[in-house]
Amino acid sequence: MTSIFRTTAAALAVSFATAPVAFAEAHALSGDLVIFSDMSNPAPRAVMEGMVERFGAMHPDLNIELTVIDRDAFKTQIRNFLTANAPDVTNWYAANRMRPYVKAGLFEDVSDLWEEPEIAENLASTKGAMTLDGKQWGVAYTYYQWGVYYRSDIYDQYGLSEPATWDEEKANCQVLLDNGVKCYAIGTKFLWTAAGWFDYLNMRTNGYDFHAALTNGEKSWTSDEVRATFAHWRELIDMGAFVDNHQSYSWQEALPFIVNGDAAAYLMGNFAVAPLREAGLDDSKLDFYQFPAINPDVALAEDAPTDTFHIPANAKNKEAAREFLRFVVSTDNQTLINAGDALGQLPVNSAASVDDDKFLQQGFQMLSSNSPGGVAQFFDRDAPAEMAAAAMEGFQEFMVIPDNLDDILQRLESARSSIY
């Protein structure tokens, strides 16, 4: 579904006057600003339309035309509209997902924005995700953390503390297993959940730069570094750390293991919190910790899938487009659009305020302050689609039949040779 939303100065006067935050005054802009957005679900759509209204009120001589396209349709249309009749601003995603459009010369280099102190300082955590070939190709506007969500009441029952090291993680796991509790819930029926484990184990073993090079096809799947990652994973598999028959469950179908206390933790994105709360786990029983360090010589990187705005290379009003990107990432706007009654996610601007939600607060602190090692986008965003599909099949197979590792790695190396 495609819909168009236009602003006029008269229509915006009232809505802006009642806006809950005040935005810094910007220099006058004129002409047309055309924006294509995939924020088609109700809450994101309201956020997008609200940003257009507020920005339009700041620039009454600017005519803004917003076209909202269904998210799945957007993915099939983006290359065509970037090539044939480009808007001035478009939504997309960070890291490898933007690579095809950067390589094709369809996204504008906006490195100049990243030299501005407010963006350079406040958006530092997402700079790596927006960088290809040493240049920045857009700005992020929201992300959410991954990490370990765990039953704090079960940890308290057995005298366990949040682990900071791999040895502490395994020691906790053994205590749980000795008391009949699985360490981790997981459902790998749809494969991608196993990729979360690979991401963290690989980044903690080899660091963000190696992980990024691997997903970019620059490193071998049969390397000693990758084998070390799987060796750490196998330590948990051989312990019996994961729930049985996980390949039969989706991630939602694995939630009852946590709710019922049959498993103590879940490596997952923050979107798991709402269904866990709805199932009866209040915040006195549910908590969060950062995936622990494995190799002390590598900085802690995180999975934090990031949504972005870009200026197409063929945009007609790049001055207004740049000003809109500045507005999107401004401190006040970041606070407003990521609030619980809006996107309910994390602002990428480290000076923004975060909703008074336990897990959003912890995620914001982790990503803004404690993650100098980089921000990955999750395996199926960081790797090309064909490579992601092959690798995720291999990850699930490894979790079920770890003795197949050599065959799995050879297949993935063959895939790397043909895909990249």
Image (cartoon, rainbow, N blue to C red):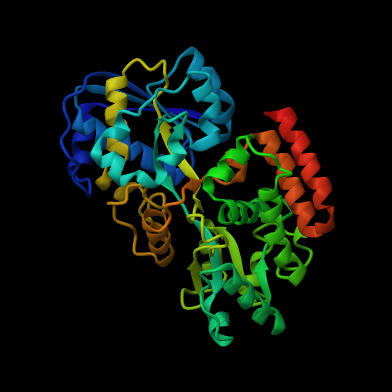
Q: Quadrant of the C terminus?
A: top right
Q: Residue 34 lies in what quarter of the image?
A: top left
Q: Position of residue 338 (x, y in %)?
A: 37, 50
Determine the residue positioned at 59% across, 68% down: 166
Q: Residue at x 32, y 20 (%)?
A: 318
Along the line of sight, the residue nearer the viewer: 374 or 341: 374
Horizontal and vertical percent position of residue 203: 57, 52
In the image, 222 versus 118, the foreground residue is 222
Q: Is residue 201 visible?
A: yes
Report x, y in % for residue 296. Answer: 52, 61
Can residue 401 be seen at all in this image of the molecule?
no
Image vertical order of residue 255 relative to residue 124, above or below: below
Is 246 or 74 nearer to us in this picture? Answer: 246
- Relative vertical location of residue 33 with respect to residue 340 in this rendering, above or below: above
Of the pair 176 and 201, the residue shown nearer to us: 201
Residue at 51 percent across and 69 percent down: it is: 164
On screen, residue 41 versus residue 417, left or right, reads: left
Left or right of 197 in this view: 249: right
Q: Is residue 320 left or right of residue 179?
A: left
